[in-house]
Amino acid sequence: MNANAPDRLPAEKAERRIDLRSDTVTQPTDAMREAMRAAVVGDDGLDGDPTVRELEAAGATAMGKEDALFVASGTMGNLVAALVHANRGGEALVDEHAHVARSEGGGISRLAGLMCTAVRSHDGMMDLDALAASMRGSYSRHGAPTAMVVVETSHNHAGGRALPLPYLAAVGERARAAGAAVHVDGARIFNAALAQDVPPSAIAAFGDTVTFCLSKGLSAPMGSILAGSRDFVVRARSYRRMVGGGLRQAGCVAAAGLVALRDMAGRLADDHRRARALWTHLRDQEPALIGNAPDTNIVLVHLGASGPGGATACAARLASRGLLVRPRDADTLRLVIHRHIDDDAIRIAAAEIVRAAGMGR
């Protein structure tokens, strides 16, 4: 558990505070804090920050790309990628539940000027026939050619699903046939790689560009990496400045990102194991609440007709007991496991969820 967080919510019966809202709540490790204190820094917008440059090189290597760019967030990384790929104009094709379409403020459309076209999908995977039908390889009376296709893995809305590699290959084939770029929104790509027992570069290889977060399970306090070809990064660096991402002595936070890449990917297995344990507890106590076993560190709880207020009301009941969760939609809770969640927290969470779900019936 997070020693720096309050021990309990202001609730009479809450014995401990368990935060399953997101793995973004992770605190930096002691090693990260020391690295941040000791970081060698420079003005990244002028002469370059040496620690940022080291992080960018490490990020590029991890993704198997020629170069990389340190950005403030995954949302910024996805937006900058769209700005670069938008040179053809036209559309960005995404699955209907993609984070870039649902949770990033419409930046692809409002700022990059790409019409964000949602393709019907299941478990985070676009229907390949529908994708092919939506693809445009050239200008027509209906619009400009497809500029980019976005795939997200692990897939947030699909409960942390790691998209199969053959599916990613099929998307890439269809995009290349139309001359469109493929961008991998890999916010949790290290989780997806672990679930599929491959290096993250094996997933990134299916994209022309890739974004991944240094926060979340890797526990850095902030920051993401956008990787691609050298030419892409030259252009991306200019667009990063345009959207307010020009950095100064950013080595102070990049140092934590280096520790995240060096030390934290290996421990994600604990999060996956505990997510499976939570799913198993729920399956054994109330099987109607859960669907397929989790691939990674996210568990979905399907409340169904669980009384007035649905997931929002259930989340409020859980908060009163010291368990913080977030609704994914009207009748589904999303639970995210991270390094501050231990085995005792998993058992307590399972019992509280079953209790709270039952109260709504």
Image (cartoon, rainbow, N blue to C red):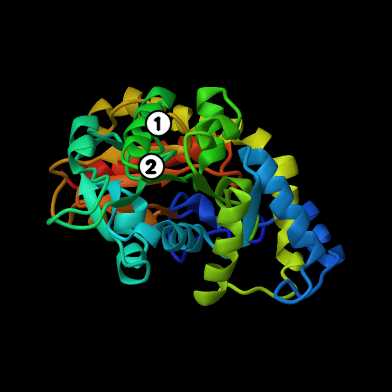
Q: Residue at x 83, y 59 (%)?
A: 34
Amino acid carrying mark 1 in the image: Leu
x, y (%) of residue 306? Answer: 16, 45
Q: Is residue 359 visible?
A: yes
Work out whether mark 1 precedes mark 2 in sequence or the reverse, and give the earlier one.
2
Left or right position of 230 against 348? right
Label 1 secondary element: helix
Above-or-below relation of 50 to 151: below
Q: Are marks 1 and 2 in contact (CB under 8 Å)?
A: yes
x, y (%) of residue 131? Answer: 23, 38
Q: Which label was assigned to residue 320?
A: none
Left or right position of 293 against 232? left
Which residue carries the number 2 mark? 151
Left or right position of 251 against 111? right
Q: Residue at x 57, y 70 (%)?
A: 238
Amino acid carrying mark 2 in the image: Val
Q: Residue at x 57, y 25 (%)?
A: 198
Q: Residue at x 22, y 49 (%)?
A: 118
Quadrant containing the C terminus is top left
Q: Is residue 6 visible?
A: no
Quarter of the figure with residue 162: top left
Label 2 secondary element: strand
x, y (%) of residue 11? Answer: 42, 62
Of residues 7 and 126, the one drawn nearer to the viewer in this rendering: 126
Quarter of the figure with residue 152: top left
Which residue carries the number 1 mark? 168
Above-or-below relation of 162 to 98: above
